[in-house]
């Protein structure tokens, strides 16, 4: 586009999620402004003049519902698309948020960053189209066309997938102490693989002794023993030295990447630059090459 990029205001206090979404949106051509608490977010609605808001509900200082209520009182909501991203998928909360004028509601553990981008593009396209109509028509169209679909109920289907693990599936172990990231990636990988999650290397050791693991996704910054030390132990072990290890880290400097590869990692991926489906594609490639 030749004109000024549209602005998305992201009100989110979870740094990892904020970095992932910011990277995804900026690569798609949007300008992203980030607020880490509710008071800052509400102020930035006025100062940044965003075209769309991505809103977490559990925030320091001022929660998402309080922000929505104030935006309604100011008359901002009808003309400003707001997409909620929340840990809760309770119908009563979704209904309450809908009544406050949101255009969509996503449950954190069920979404993929690509889905968020698609929702942003869809909501902005709807808002642009409605600019040519009356304000009343725009509000009606937003309420009618963008009611959240079945993001929350899909947890049941996901759980059924997890419970129906097939013995022929390859096994991936995720060693990650950030449970949000571990769950997000685990849900994606569970579509094809048996997935075990460990919050530290002691738990990872127990998983390895319980049964074969075909690939390890390893964080570097872990409680207790760090990822580099654990990788060194794996490579010294006759039992585990041939298991491919994909490092997933927030450390993206060239020297860190080289250090990981020199230590024996098969690949080194920077979390903020990769969506879960992209990580799974890399896992697919590695496991296919070993078949």
Image: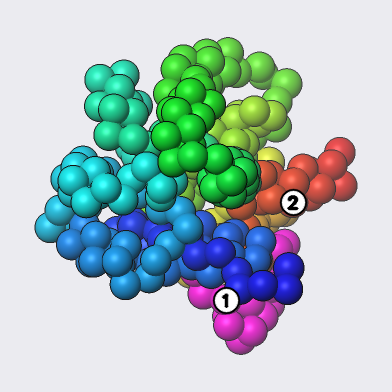
Picture layout, residue 270 above or below residue 143: below
Which sits in the foreground, 61 or 31? 31
What residue appears at the point 57 percent right and 76 percent down from the top-left corner? 252
Query: From mark 2 to mark 1, how far is it between C-alphas?
Result: 17 Å
Residue 147 visible in the current orientation:
yes
Q: Where is residue 199 in the image (x, y as percent from the top left)?
A: 38, 48
What residue appears at the point 53 percent right and 15 percent down from the top-left corner? 157
Which sits in the foreground, 117 or 239? 117
Cβ–Cβ under 8 Å for marks 2 and 1: no
Q: Where is residue 142 in the image (x, y as percent from the top left)?
A: 48, 33
Which sits in the foreground, 248 or 37? 37
What residue appears at the point 65 percent right and 66 percent down from the top-left corner? 29
Q: Mark 1 points at which residue?
A: 252
Q: How crowded is mark 2: few (under 14 residues within 10 Å), some or many (20 or more)?
A: some
Picture layout, residue 197 above or below residue 282: above
Left or right position of 101 against 277: left
- On residue 2, which mark appears? none
What residue appears at the point 51 percent right and 74 percent down from the top-left corner? 251
Which quadrant of the structure image shows residue 91? top left
Quarter of the image that includes the C terminus:
top right
- On residue 282, which mark appears? 2
Q: How crowded is mark 1: few (under 14 residues within 10 Å), some or many (20 or more)?
A: some
Q: Where is residue 272 in the image (x, y as percent from the top left)?
A: 54, 64
Give the magenta-colored segment's residue range: 249-267
The residue lying furthest to the front in this view is: 134
Residue 264 forms part of the magenta stretch? yes
Which sits in the foreground, 3 or 28? 3
Helix or strand or loop: what does disc 2 sit on?
helix
């Amino acid at each position: 586009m030749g004109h000024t990029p549209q602005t998305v205001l992201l009100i989110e206090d979870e740094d990892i999620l904020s970095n992932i979404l910011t990277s995804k949106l900026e690569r798609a051509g949007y300008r992203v402004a980030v607020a880490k608490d509710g008071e800052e977010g509400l102020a930035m609605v006025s100062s940044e003049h965003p075209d769309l808001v991505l809103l977490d509900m559990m925030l320091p200082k001022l929660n998402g519902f309080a922000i929505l209520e104030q935006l309604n009182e100011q008359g901002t909501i009808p003309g400003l698309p707001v997409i909620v991203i929340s840990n809760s998928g309770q119908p009563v909360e979704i209904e309450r948020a809908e009544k406050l004028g949101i255009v969509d509601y996503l449950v954190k553990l069920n979404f993929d960053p690509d889905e968020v981008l698609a929702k942003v593009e869809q909501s902005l396209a709807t808002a642009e189209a409605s600019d040519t109509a009356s304000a009343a028509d725009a509000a009606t169209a937003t309420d009618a066309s963008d009611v959240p679909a079945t993001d929350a109920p899909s947890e049941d289907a996901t759980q059924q997938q997890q419970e129906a693990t097939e013995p022929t599936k390859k096994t991936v172990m995720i060693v990650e102490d950030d449970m949000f990231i571990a769950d997000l990636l685990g849900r994606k990988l569970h579509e094809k693989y048996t997935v075990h999650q460990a919050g530290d290397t002691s738990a990872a050791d127990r998983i390895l002794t319980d049964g074969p693991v075909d690939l390890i996704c390893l964080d570097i910054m872990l409680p207790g023993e760090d990822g580099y030390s654990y990788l060194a132990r794996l490579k010294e072990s006759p039992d585990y030295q041939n298991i491919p290890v994909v490092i997933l880290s927030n450390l993206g400097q060239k020297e860190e990447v080289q250090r990981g590869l020199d230590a024996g990692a098969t690949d080194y991926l920077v979390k903020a630059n990769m969506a879960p489906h992209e990580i799974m594609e890399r896992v697919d490639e590695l496991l296919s090459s070993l078949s």
